[in-house]
Image (tube, rainbow, N blue to C red):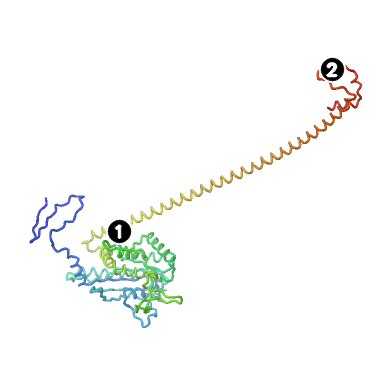
C-alpha cells in the first residue's frame, strides 16, 4: 500500500517496496524538491577545494621521461636557458608541484620524475624505490585519515597515475619491463607509453602496439582501463574511442619550441629531413594521452586509486576494516574479471590451434590425394606404353607372316600355273578325290613330274 508523506507544501508519494526481482523504476517527484541541484553543489565544492592530481613517470634511463612531463601540461616544469639543451639526467625521485587554473577550476598538479633504471649492471629489484615511494604516499594519507583532529579536507598526495615508458625496440616487451609492471600494476594505475615514437615507422609502431598489448594480456598485467563515459555527445565519444584505441600511447617529447606562421608556439623535434610536431596527431599520440589524462579520465584515475589501490594497500597492511568488505568485493571482482579474461584468451588460443590443425590436416589430405592421382596417372601411362609396344610387335609379326604367306601363295600359284601349262599338252586333269584313274597313261609320267606332285 502506498503511503503519503507531506513535506511542507510538497507531497511525495512513497512507493511500496519493490518485490524481489522487480526492476526499480525511479519515482518522479510531483514538485521541485531541490536535489536536482546536487551536481552543482558537488561542482561548487570541487571548484572551492580544487583538485589534486599526481602523475609519475617511470622507465629506463634516457627514454624522454623528463622531456615528456615538461611538455604535458603546457608549462615548463624544467626550465633551461636553451630549449635544445638536454634536460639533465634524473638521479633521484623529484616531485614538482604546480598550481594550475583553467576557467576558475584549480588543479594542484604534482609531477614525479624518477631516475631511469638500466644504467646499473645489476637491475634486480630496481622497482623497489618506486614501490617504496608509492607506499610512503599511501602511509601519509592513512596518517591524515586516522588523526582525531583530522582536517576537513585531506591533502591527497597519493600517486594517481604512472606513465610507464617502453623503449621503442619494435619487438615486444622486454623481461625487465614485464617484471617491472608486474610489480607495479596492483599498486598504481599504469598507463603504458611507447617512448621516442619518432624512431619508428607507422607500421612498425602499429605492430609494436599489438605485441605489447598481447604481452600484457599473456602476463596478466592489468593496465588502467579508460572506461567509456556514458551519456556524452557523439563527437566526444568518437574522440574518446580514438584515444582509447591509441593505447599504448606512442609519444614524442621535445623541449624545442618554434612559432608557426599564425604565431602559435609548438614543440617540435627538428631533423635534417623535416620536423616532428609533438602535438600533431599524425606524428604522435601525445594529444590522445593528454586528453585521457586530463580531459576525460583524471577523475577516474583518482577514484580508482582511492577505491582500489589505496584500499588494497590498507587491506594488505591489515589496516581499518571500515571499507574492508568493499575492498574484498572489489578485489574479488577484479580477480574474477581477470579469470574470465584469462579463460577467454585460453579459449581463443585453443580455437585458433584447433583451426590451424584442421587446416593443416585438410592440406595434407589434399596433397596425399594429389600424389595418389599422380601415381595412378603414371602407372596408367606406363601400362599404356607397354600395351602399345606389344601391339606394335604383334602387328609387325603379323605383317611379316602376311607377306610370307603372300610370297608363298604366289609361288604356289606360279608353280600351279606352270604345272597346268604342262598338263594341257601331256598330263590329264587331276582326278576327283575318291576316284582312281583307269588310265595307265598317267603312270608313264617321268620322275621329275612325280617329285613336283609330291611337293604340292
Ligand atoms: N628522438 C627522440 N628523442 C627524445 C624524445 N624525448 C626526449 N628525447 C631525447 O632523449 C634524451 C633523454 O631525455 P630525458 O628526458 O632526459 O630522458 P629521461 O628518461 O628523463 O632520462 P633519465 O633521467 O636518465 O631517466 C634527450 O636528449 C631528449 O632530447 C623523443 O620523443 N624522441
Ligand atoms: Mg629524467
Q: Nearer the viewer, residue 95 or 168?
A: 168
Question: Callout 1: helix, strand or loop?
Answer: helix
**Mark 1 vs ligand 1: CB below 8 Å:** no
Residue sitting at x 17%, y 69%: 148
Residue labelled with disc 2 = 436
Quadrant of residue 321 within the rendered picture:
bottom left
Quadrant of residue 414 within the rendered picture:
top right
Q: CB atoms at circles 2 and 1 under 8 Å apart?
A: no
| 313 over 107 or under it: above or below | above
Q: Residue furthest top?
A: 438
Residue sitting at x 40%, y 64%: 209
| 202 over 418 or under it: above or below | below
Q: Residue furthest front?
A: 424
Q: Residue furthest bottom?
A: 81
* Residue 443 percent across, percent down from the top left: 90, 20
**Location of the C terminus (image quadrant):** top right
Residue labelled with disc 1 = 334
| Crowd tier of the residue under label 1, counting other residues whose Cα lies within 10 Å: few below 14, some 14–19, many 20 or above | some
Residue sitting at x 19%, y 50%: 20
Lateral position of residue 329 relative to residue 391, left or right: left
Lateral position of residue 318 relative to residue 433, left or right: left
Circle on res. 238: none
* Residue 3 percent across, percent down from the top left: 10, 53
Query: Distance of mark 2 from mark 1, alpha carbons?
Result: 131 Å
Q: Tell which circle, 2 or 1, labels the residue nearer the N-terminal end.
A: 1
Q: Nearer the viewer, residue 17 or 221?
A: 17
Quadrant of residue 196 within the rendered picture:
bottom left
Q: Nearer the viewer, residue 446 or 344?
A: 446
**Mark 2 vs ligand 1: CB below 8 Å:** no
Question: Callout 2: helix, strand or loop?
Answer: loop
* Residue 123 percent across, percent down from the top left: 40, 69
**Nearer to us: label 2 or label 1:** 2
Amino acid at each position: 500500500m502506498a503511503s503519503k508523506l507531506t513535506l511542507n507544501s510538497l507531497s511525495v508519494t512513497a512507493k511500496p517496496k519493490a518485490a524481489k526481482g522487480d526492476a526499480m523504476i525511479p519515482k518522479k517527484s510531483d514538485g521541485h524538491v531541490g536535489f536536482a541541484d546536487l551536481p552543482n553543489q558537488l561542482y561548487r565544492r570541487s571548484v572551492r577545494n580544487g583538485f589534486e592530481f599526481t602523475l609519475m613517470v617511470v622507465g629506463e634511463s634516457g627514454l624522454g621521461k623528463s622531456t615528456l612531463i615538461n611538455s604535458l601540461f603546457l608549462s615548463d616544469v624544467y626550465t633551461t636557458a636553451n630549449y635544445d639543451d638536454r634536460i639533465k639526467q634524473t638521479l633521484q625521485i623529484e616531485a614538482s608541484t604546480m598550481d594550475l587554473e583553467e576557467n576558475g577550476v584549480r588543479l594542484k598538479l604534482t609531477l614525479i620524475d624518477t631516475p631511469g633504471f638500466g644504467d646499473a649492471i645489476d637491475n634486480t629489484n630496481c622497482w623497489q624505490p618506486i614501490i617504496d615511494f608509492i607506499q610512503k604516499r599511501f602511509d601519509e594519507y592513512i596518517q591524515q585519515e586516522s588523526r582525531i583532529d583530522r582536517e576537513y579536507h585531506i591533502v591527497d598526495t597519493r600517486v594517481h597515475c604512472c606513465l610507464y615508458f617502453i623503449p621503442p625496440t619494435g619487438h615486444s616487451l622486454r623481461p625487465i619491463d614485464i617484471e617491472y609492471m608486474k610489480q607495479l600494476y596492483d599498486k598504481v594505475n599504469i598507463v603504458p607509453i611507447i617512448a621516442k615514437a619518432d624512431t619508428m615507422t607507422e607500421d612498425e609502431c602499429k605492430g609494436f602496439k599489438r605485441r605489447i598489448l598481447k604481452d600484457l594480456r599473456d602476463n596478466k598485467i592489468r593496465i588502467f582501463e579508460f572506461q567509456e563515459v556514458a551519456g556524452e555527445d557523439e563527437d566526444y565519444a568518437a574522440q574518446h574511442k580514438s584515444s582509447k584505441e591509441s593505447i599504448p600511447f606512442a609519444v614524442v617529447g621535445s623541449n624545442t619550441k618554434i612559432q608557426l606562421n599564425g604565431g602559435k608556439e609548438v614543440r617540435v623535434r627538428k631533423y635534417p629531413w623535416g620536423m616532428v610536431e609533438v602535438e600533431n596527431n599524425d606524428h604522435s599520440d601525445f594529444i590522445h594521452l593528454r586528453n585521457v589524462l586530463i580531459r576525460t579520465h583524471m577523475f577516474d584515475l583518482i577514484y580508482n586509486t582511492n577505491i582500489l589501490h589505496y584500499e588494497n594497500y590498507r587491506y594488505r597492511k591489515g589496516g581499518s576494516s571500515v571499507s574492508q568488505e568493499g575492498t574484498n568485493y572489489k578485489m574479488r571482482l577484479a580477480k574474477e574479471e581477470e579469470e574470465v579474461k584469462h579463460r577467454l584468451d585460453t579459449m581463443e588460443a585453443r580455437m585458433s590451434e584447433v583451426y590451424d590443425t584442421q587446416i593443416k590436416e585438410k592440406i595434407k589430405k589434399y596433397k596425399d590425394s594429389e600424389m595418389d592421382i599422380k601415381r595412378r596417372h603414371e602407372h596408367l601411362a606406363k601400362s599404356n606404353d607397354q600395351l602399345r609396344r606389344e601391339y606394335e610387335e604383334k602387328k609387325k609379326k603379323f605383317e611379316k607372316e602376311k607377306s610370307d604367306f603372300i610370297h608363298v601363295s604366289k609361288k604356289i600359284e606360279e608353280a600351279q600355273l606352270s604345272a597346268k601349262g604342262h598338263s594341257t599338252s601331256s598330263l590329264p586333269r587331276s582326278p576327283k578325290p575318291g576316284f582312281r584313274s583307269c588310265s595307265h597313261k598317267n603312270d608313264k609320267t617321268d620322275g621329275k613330274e612325280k617329285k613336283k606332285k609330291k611337293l604340292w
